Image (cartoon, rainbow, N blue to C red):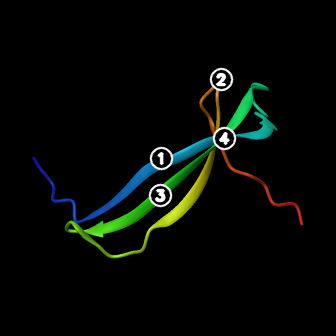
Amino acid sequence: MGALQVFNLQEKVIGKQGAGATCPYCGGPVLAWDFDSHLLFCFIPITRHKTKTKFYCTICSTRLVPSTNA
């Protein structure tokens, strides 16, 4: 049984750098990964390239979401 995938989000790693923080779960160092992403509709790009930053722990591989304290 197959399904036709109409929308596709492609992400490519641009760079990695230390975030200067520690993981709240295991205390390991955190890396900031920079991604270039764009959305495709049937192999036709429908959005511009966006740069996203995601944070991951290097020891437990948990994706971390930065909190905003206002």
Which is more toward the observer, 62 or 56? Answer: 56
Q: CA distance from mark 3 to mark 2?
A: 24 Å
Label 1, label 3: how far apart the Cα atoms are:
6 Å
From the viewer's perspective, is the residue at label 2 or at label 4 nearer?
A: 4
In percent of the image, x 51 and y 53: which residue is there? 35
Q: Earlier in the sequence, mark 1 or mark 3?
A: 1
User: Measured from the top left, where is residue 46 in percent x and y?
Assistant: 33, 76
Residue at the image point whose x is 55% and y is 45% from the top: 15
- Choose the circle earlier in sequence order: 2 or 4: 4
Task: Name the residue type under label 1.
Answer: Val
Find disc 1 in the rendering and name its residue. 13
- Disc 2: which residue: 59
Find numbered disc 3 in the image and state the secondary structure of the residue it sits on.
strand
Q: Is residue 34 left or right of residue 65?
A: left
How many angstroms separate mark 2 from mark 4 (CA)?
A: 15 Å
Q: Tell me, for residue 17, which label it has, or none.
A: 4
Where is residue 54? Give x, y as percent: 61, 49
Few, some or many C-alpha atoms within 10 Å of disc 1 (few <14, some 14-19, many ≥20)? Answer: few
Q: Which mark is residue 36?
A: 3
- The residue drawn where x is 80% and y is 38% is 21
Report which quarter residue 19 is drawn in: top right
The local crowd at label 4, few if under 14, some if 14 to 19, many if 20 or more residues have their Cα within 10 Å, is few
> How far apart are the two marked residues, 1 and 4, measured between alpha carbons?
12 Å
Q: Does label 2 or label 1 sit earlier along the sequence?
A: 1
Identify residue type, mark 4.
Gln
**SS type, badge 4:** strand
**In x, y percent, where is residue 30?**
71, 35
